[in-house]
Image (cartoon, grey):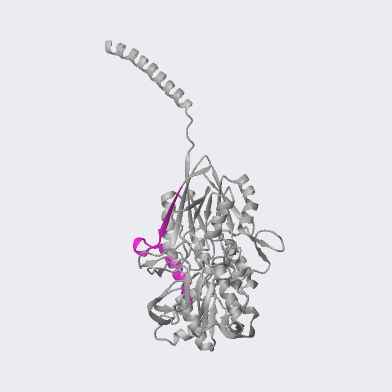
Amino acid sequence: MTYTKFFIPFLGIASVLSLSCNSTKKSASMDKPIPPKVHSITILHTNDMHGSYMPFETNLGNATAQTGDSIDNYMKFERKAKIGGFEYLASAIKSVRKNKGVDSVILLDGGDTFSDDQLGNLTKGEAMIKLMNEVNYDLMALGNHDFDYGLDRTKELQQLANFPMRAANITVNETGKSIFGEPYIILNKGDVKIAILALSYRNTPLTGNSKNIEGLEFGIGVDAVNKYLPILKEKADIIVLLSHEGMAVDKVIAEEIEGVDLIVGAHSHDVISPPIKINNTYIVQALSDVAILGETEIQIRDKKIVNLNSNYHYLWHDKMSPDMEIQKMVKDLRAPYLSSLEEKITKTNTIIGRQYKSESPFDKFVTSLMMDELNVEAAFLPGVGYGISLEGDITSEDIFKLLPHPAKIVTLEITGEQIRKTLEQTAINIKPTDKMNTVGGLIQSSGIQYNLNFNNPVGQRISDIKIKDENLDLEKRYKIATHTGMLRGIHNYEEFGKGVDIQKTDIILTEFVLQHLRDLNELAFPKRMGEVILNK
């Protein structure tokens, strides 16, 4: 009893003291505001898949076609190994969603997605859309190659897709409205609203068949952002731009416009690591050809980005396992066309790649073949940025990755002066005075030698032009070969359409190349490399 009587009063005093201390602590803590909670939201992103659902072998010193000789952002693979493929992409996506939580992950694609591949051609883009549906993309920006099968087919693919395909700077002439509906989505992540605005490539009419985009108007991305930004600021806390305008123009947007928090880029096939930050805008991009899954984690406090972390998941086959369901789906999609896709055409014991802003070995082979077989003095093709290297056994689908479009061979005569203007145009395309005018890569050619110096003034960048080891005669007419796309003036090459004695054949360039390759036991490294000397 004595102990009990003693203990009860003690507990009472202790309780009072405890309450007093707690009250003091609460009072003190109320004087200091509790910092707002930090939200972490992960944006996964792909771009410029170009129908590349299959793995490929990397080569040292060259990434993919557009980055292997990039002037602005050189990138190369550090080792030779298998990479990519949609089953590996799906595995990486599922892994991040599992680790970060499905509700905090957004999946975006920057466009140029479902064509430029033989299975893409055979299914008119449906194969890639089916694969993308399986991994639940949230939004895709329409790239310039997403109209390769015509506008009506792009509409059908949008109906097949369980995600929107949009672009703020593509309007329908008949209605004046953005293609396929509002060009943005608003996603609620916790108490944070994220707006994602999609942009296409302003120069799309210069990169393909104009018939494929009849009825559409392609505007400047900067103008579209300025139009929609006030609307999005009313609706969302964080503004993300999903842009197919290319890194150079994305930088311009960041420099000129306040209020865009993040630009997820495409078109220029860049790995932007670490992210670029201009003013208050971050810029990221994840190469091309399903080689990398970009992961950009934004940390948000008080509805503003306070930090950003980026991680690029290189889809090396020896570092991860494929998703078995997607692997089976790929096999099933290929099954009806397997004999065509896997037809062995020839082989090569060297590496024959595609370059974009310098002489391209593969395109040198093709233009040399045109020159020799068509009895012309020179041959020209556009510089294009898709495709991967040939090595070992060469199949039909390997060639279609490099020559996917049904352009037909053309021969014609143009003057030496027209050739000079064409070469000056290729220099302007790569390095114009206004970055908005950037379009295409170096014109690919055989039979013509010249120097290109980007440090000289515009219009004076080309010198020492020779054909058949003789100085170019500006007055003389030269017989050349090209294809119907060049005749229509893609990449601003207007001089071909002004030629004389234009002979349009019914020979599709891809079939022309395939047939000649079938007759070769082995494809050697192309002759005539080194005709162009570049000073960057």
Q: Residue 6 at what x, y percent from top left? A: 30, 12
Question: Would residue 475 be visible to someone looking at this image?
Answer: yes
The residue segment tinted magenta is 308-337
Report the front residue among 256 and 386.
256
Tell me which corner region of the image, top left, top right, bottom left or bottom right, holds residue 92: bottom left
How many numbered circles does the render carry? 0
Question: Would residue 358 be visible to someone looking at this image?
Answer: no
Q: Is residue 324 magenta?
A: yes
Q: Residue 298 at what x, y percent from top left? A: 48, 48
On screen, 507 above or below 20? below
Q: Residue 425 at what x, y percent from top left? A: 58, 72
Report the front residue among 390 and 13.
390
Q: Is residue 481 magenta?
A: no
Q: Residue 294 at what x, y percent from top left? A: 45, 57
On screen, 499 above or below 142? below
On screen, 128 above or below 250? below
Q: Residue at x 64, y 48 (%)?
A: 231
Report the front residue among 90 and 379.
379
| Quadrant (top left, top right, bottom left, bottom right) of the N terminus | top left
Report the front residue among 166 and 91.
166
On screen, 466 above or below 66? below
Left/right of residue 141 with respect to residue 338 in the rendered view: right
